[in-house]
Structures are given as C-alpha cells and as structure tokens.
Image: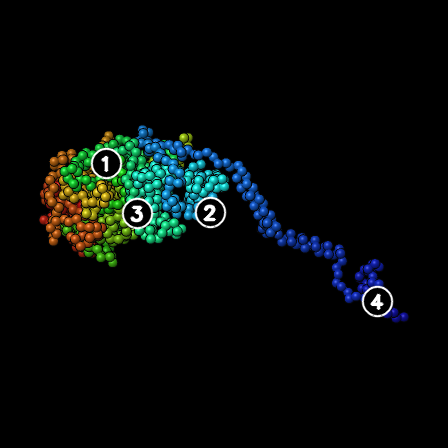
Amino acid sequence: MSDQSPPPGWTPRDPDTPATPPAQQPSAHKPQEPQKLQKPSGERQSRRAANKAERNRKRTGRRRLVPTWRMVLGTVLLLALLVIGALVAGYLLVRIPPANAAATAQSNLYLYADGSQLARDGEVNRVNVPLSQIPRTVQEAVLAAEDRDFYSERAVDPKAMIRAAWNTATGKGTQSGSTITQQYVKNYYLGQEQTIKRKVKEFFIAIKLGREKSKDYILEGYLNTSYFGRNAYGIQAAAQAYYGKDVGKLTTAEGAYLATLLNSPSAFDVVAHPQSRTRALARWNYVLDGMVKKQWLPAAERTATQFPEPGKVRPAAGLSGQRGYLVEAIKDHIVERKILDEKTLAKGGYRITTTIDKRRQNAFVDAVDEKMADKLDPATRKADRVVRAGGVSIDPATGKVVAMYGGIDYTKQYVNNATRHDYQVASTFKPFVFAAAVENDSRTQDGRLITPNTVYNGDNKRRVVGTRTPYAPENEGQLSYGNITVNTATDLSVNAVFAQMVVDVGTAKVKKTAIDLGIPENTPNFVAGPAMALGTMQASVLDMTQAYATLADHGRYTPYTFVEKITKGSDSIPLPDRTPKQAVSREAADTTTSMLVSVVDNGTGTAALAAGHPAGGKTGTGELDRSAWFAAYTPDLVTVVSMMGQDPDTGALESLYGALGEARIGGGGYPARIWAQYTKTALEGSDPLDFDLELQPGAAPSPPPFVPGSPEPTPDEDTPQSPPPPSRPNRPNRPTPPDGDEDQGGRNQGQDTEGRTTEGDTTGGRSNEGATTGTTNGTTGTTGGTASGTTTGTTTGALGGVTGGRPRSRPPSEYLE
C-alpha cells in the first residue's frame, strides 16, 4: 500500500530534525505566513557571547594599551576638574605678601682672592613718586616698551607663563612674556629667581592684585620699583642718574630711553658700554615706533625726535681708583654667563670672592703709573689729554684673571679700557694667522709648507696674490724688505708678508682659529678678508689676553674667569663649567710661541727683556696711531697692555701723535715697558722658566737658553728726544687723514701702521744699537713674487739704507709698528 500524501499545511520533516514542539506548531486555522529565518534564542545568546569574546580577543597585545574614547573623555574631564580645583585652591591659599627685601636691598661684597675686601658696590638709590608726577608721555613710553595693551588686558598672560615655565623646566633658558602686573609682582613682592615655584606664586598674586587694585596703582608701583641701571630703582632715581633732572621734567625722547633701559639696564647704557650703542638705539626706536602705532605720539613729532644723550656716570666714592673697573667687569662677567641675572644681582646681599690677586693688582697700577701716567703733562702737552691705558693679566694654566688695569680712576674716567671694543688690535693679530697656517698644514701659492723658515716677499705695496679683492698693503715707512722668512717678517711685523699669508691659509680658516683661541665671534669689524691679517678687528684687551693665554698653554683653551666663589647666606651659587679644551694643536701653538720669543729677543719687543724672564710677545700699533699694543707672555703669566687715544670731552678716538713728547707711540715703547715692570714684580720670587716647545717639522730650532738681559735703560737713555714723524716718498710729513681715507699717503683702509727703526747697522735682523750679522735663507720656489735662492740681508728700504730689512734711526726700545 502506497504512502498517503501529507495533509494540507503539514511541513515535511527531515528524519534527522527534532520535532517541533507543539506550542510552536502553526495553527491549522491560520493562513501560513512566509517563513522567517529566525535563530533560536539559545543560538542568539551564543552568538553574542562569541562576538564579545572576539572583541576581547582583538584587544590583546599592544591594542589593549590604546585607550577607548570613553577612557579618553573620562581622563580629560578628570584633568579639567583637577586643574580647576588647583586654580581655585591656589587663588584661595596664595595671599598677597608684604613687600620683599628690594625696598631694603643690600650691597654686594667683593673680595680679593685672599679674602680681603676689594669693594662694596654702593647703596641702593630709590625714590618713590606718585603717578601724577610722571609725564603722560613717559608712562606711554614705558607701556610701548613693555606692555602696550596694559590697560585693556588681563593681569596675567597664561600662554607666556606656560612658555616661560616650560623653558625653565627643560633647561632652554629663561624667557619673559610677563605683563606689567606680573613684573610688578616680581619686583615688589617676590624676587628675580627663575623657578617654577616663583612663577606659580607670581601667577596667583597677579590675578588677585588685578582684581583688587586699579591699573594706575599697578603702573605706579611698577615705575617706582623697576631697576634702570646705575644703581637706580624707580623712574625718579633713573631720571636723576641719567639726566640730572626730576622725572616731571623728562622729555618724550628721554622717557623713551629710560624705557629702553628696562629691557637690559647696564647693556643699554651707551655711556658705560659704548659698544652697545647700536642695540640701544634700535630699542629706543622700537619704543618710539610703538608709541606712534598706539597713537600716543604724532608721526611728525616722532620724525623730529633726536636721541637724548645721557649724562656721565657718577660712581660711588667707594668705587674710586681701580675698584670700580673691577666691580663692573665682574658684574658683567656674572650677568653675561647667566650666573645671576642683572636685577637679581642688583638686589644685593651676595659675597663674591674674585680671582684678583691683590699684590699683582697693585703691581699693575704701579707699573702704569711709573712708566706712563706719572710722565703725562696735559697742561704743557695738549696731546697728553687723550692718553688712556688698559691691561689684563691671566694665569694661563687656570684661566683666572689675576689683575686688570681699567683706567686712571673709575670716578674720573668710567669707561673700562680693558673691556672696551672700539680700538683695532693691529699687529697683535698676526700670530693668529701663523697659528692657523700650522693648524691647517697650509701652503704658499706655489705649494711650500708654511713654517717660520718659509720665504715670502716683503716689498712695500706688493699686490696680494690669490684673492679677488684688490689689496696691496703698505709697510710702515713704505719700506721694502725683499725676500725674508716668516720668522723675520714677524720680528719686523711686515704687513706685506702676513697679508699674503692670510690668503694662502684662507681667511675663513684664520677667523676660525682666532675664535678657537678665544676671540668672540661677534667682535666688531671681525671680517674675514685680507685686511684682517693687519688687525682691523676691534677686540678688547681682555679678549686678546684670553687668546694669547691659549697660545701660552700650548693651545689649550681655558675660559677666563673673574669669580672664584659666590655665596648668599648659606647658599652657594653654582658657577659655569670651565673644562679646558684643546683649541689648536700643541704644534701650532708652540711654533707660534717660538716666533714670538724671537720678537722679544730680536725684534720689536726687546724692551720686554727687562722683565728678567723668558717671554714671547707681539707689538702692534693701530691705524692713525690711535692705539699701541704689547701682548706677551712667560710660561706662567700672560699680560696684554694697550695705550689708547680718546678725547676726554667728546669721547672721540684720537691719534697719539705727540703724546708724552714722542712724535709717535708704538707697542714696543711704553706698553712694552709697562709689561716688563709689571711682569718682573708679579713673578718676583719665582725662578725664570724656559718654554717647553714642540715645534712643527721644518720649523726653526728652539731658541738658545735664556740669558737675562741688561737692566732697563734709564729714562734719559730710553726715551731720547724723538725726531719728527718719518717722511715718505711723495709724502712730506705724516698727515692725520680722516678714517678710511685710502688716498692720502697710499694707506689702505684698516691698515696697521708699523715701523721699526734702530741705530747702527744691522744684517739679518737683530740690532741693539750696533752691528749684528745674520742671514735669511730662502730655499725654494716663489710665492707671488718671492725669489728662490739665498738672501743675505741686502734689501734696501725706501727710507735710507737698510741691511737685512731693518731701517736705521732709533734704538730697539723705540721700534714702532
């Protein structure tokens, strides 16, 4: 019997499929709906669990470290609550404190190296005045300089605060972006410390002060507490210190200059630091332009405004003599090296132990007085009015400045001649050219290694070969020396030789070597060109002493310092690291030293023999005889002395012609004599040390053992009545042309003025008022006109007979460069 057909509405069932529960069977009375693909409840739960497990599985490893958006949002909200809570707590907890110690600031105490007192830097000068007594234009000048939106902005600038705090925390240096309110808080309630704690307090106190006090109250306080330099706190004290008048009488231009000082008080004092005049004028113009931009000053009045020259510095009586020069140099040293900022140092209370050796300091002053200052007679000789002197002495092994001569008296002549940067260094630069040649294994134009024995042509106005810059320097006296060795050219300071050598070495390489030795890269007129060999740059005496100290210490550079220790109460202020480094090779430094020893023994520096110690040095005389230098050293002491000409009334640089009854002043004269007396006294009690030199291959052998020279001649023998300035072909007398005059007398721009004269016949170099025989041997090739072969002292100069390149007329002590 066959199977019967299934009844209508009955769904066929697979034998392997479980029977549908009765409750789920469709009703026979309802029409069948299209079947939906539904998953059983148990299966859906299983799928959800599987999906969750899959999600968890996917966040294993590194993915589990990535926060979800819920976590990020929660963290942000939590941080926001914490910041708001901290701000509220800070505002409630930080109170406006009483005035800080600035109102009763102390003096700083400066000590010699032995602990005895050198000086105190004077009492604080402070006078408070109401805002109503300060001219409106002066107020606006300060706002233009420091905070142009003061009256419309909030008390704090959060962005600037965060930036400054971050820079301090990360060691990127200090940075200010503070409003005037914040600066007032720092001046009056807190201090100048660059710490995060101080900045946090400053932030909350400024907010409170801004809510509780008016803008006029805050501006008045700021103007009465700010430091303006010259030991003056407040706008009234500054008006008196710089212009000798009350604040109410200040002009707009004067107010703008005082506002300029707020940025960098001492650095922008154009009287105390004339080298900063360009920067100070730029800042002054910025202030005036800001006033115009804010419509506080009519443009026409701005155009007609002239810079108001401030008055002379009036130092405290306690800083007379050399003390003021020393204190100011030490302050500058501390501020420039960021040991303390200027305003913090000005608050006082610091005990500063210096490196100055009291005995050597006194010896330096005595040497200048006895060899130069006591012989000045301004009443009789007008030229004596312009004479200035500066000097620095450094221990090359430690870099410590042991003595410094800044001028006749700080209370009479406040510009420090040892640190100023407005005189050419002249031929004292030439050793750097040779040191660079040895350091770089430089060769002449025809391929010969440059050593002390290398022959160059020393003819007057010889065109320099190998440069696109037309340059034919004039030797002093227009003397031609023919073929001479580098050693002899150094003895005689022949311009033509070193102008060629600097091109042979490469001007950029020479500049780098000078910087490595210790010359600051930003030195005025430090231009890499052929003329740099003749010393056209304007380094300070201190800078030159640093560079020569590197040569003396076999090429090892140790940054100089004036400071041994700084303390305040029980706290010791950290000092910068001064780890020595090898700036140039010992071979380069020692070979240069060997030639400088020859300058003292045989050349223009023979007056230094009176020191009684082996020494090497170099003389130099600046353009138009405005400066005369002697830079020299023994193995254990480096000293540079310079004489300078400056009008005491106008401050203009002047020539030294006729000073001290001399037609001309050269580095081998008074500067070398001062050096000799000081060095003899400074090294008294110590045995003379010979130089321990390691020379480059091919250099001259070491100098013979040192034999102490005869005593220094008496003044009558040493300074005979000088003849008129030497005449020259087509030039009857030495004129005094204006700066940069290239047409008068054939002198090239920036050229060193050098001349050496002796009495008696000389062959081959050495002369001591008698005849000495020597030879100059040229071995190979030519350098831009240098003949090969042997030259035996037969060159004839343009002025009279010369044998071996030395003109005849005056004794060695009077060699001029």
On screen, 2 above or below 306? below
Give the Cα distance between marks 1 and 2: 51 Å
Question: In terms of sequence position, does the residue under pointer 3 or pointer 1 come before the other?
Answer: 3
The residue that mark 3 highlights is 307
Question: In terms of sequence position, does the residue under pointer 3 or pointer 2 come before the other?
Answer: 2
Amino acid type indicated by mark 1: Ile
Asked which secondary structure carries label 1, the reply is loop
Amino acid type indicated by mark 3: Phe
Give the Cα distance between marks 4 and 1: 129 Å
Any mark on residue 96, and which?
A: none
Residue appearing at x 44%, y 36% in the figure: 189
Give the Cα distance between marks 3 and 2: 31 Å
Asked which secondary structure carries label 4, the reply is loop
Relative to the observer, which residue lies in front, 343 or 310? 310
The residue that mark 1 highlights is 408
Question: In terms of sequence position, does the residue under pointer 2 or pointer 4 come before the other?
Answer: 4
Residue appearing at x 23%, y 43% in the figure: 650
Give the Cα distance between marks 3 and 4: 113 Å
Labels 4, 1: front one? 1
Labels 1, 2: front one? 2
The residue that mark 2 highlights is 153
**Left/right of residue 3 with respect to residue 678 in the rendered view:** right
Q: Residue lying at the far front in this picture: please name it.
A: 132
Relative to the observer, which residue lies in front, 743 or 458? 743
Labels 3, 1: front one? 3
Any mark on residue 9, and which?
A: 4
Relative to the observer, which residue lies in front, 373 or 8? 373
* Residue 163 can be seen, yes or no: no
Give the Cα distance between marks 3 and 1: 29 Å
Tell me residue 661's x, y (percent): 14, 40
Amino acid type indicated by mark 2: Glu
Tell me residue 414's x, y (percent): 27, 38
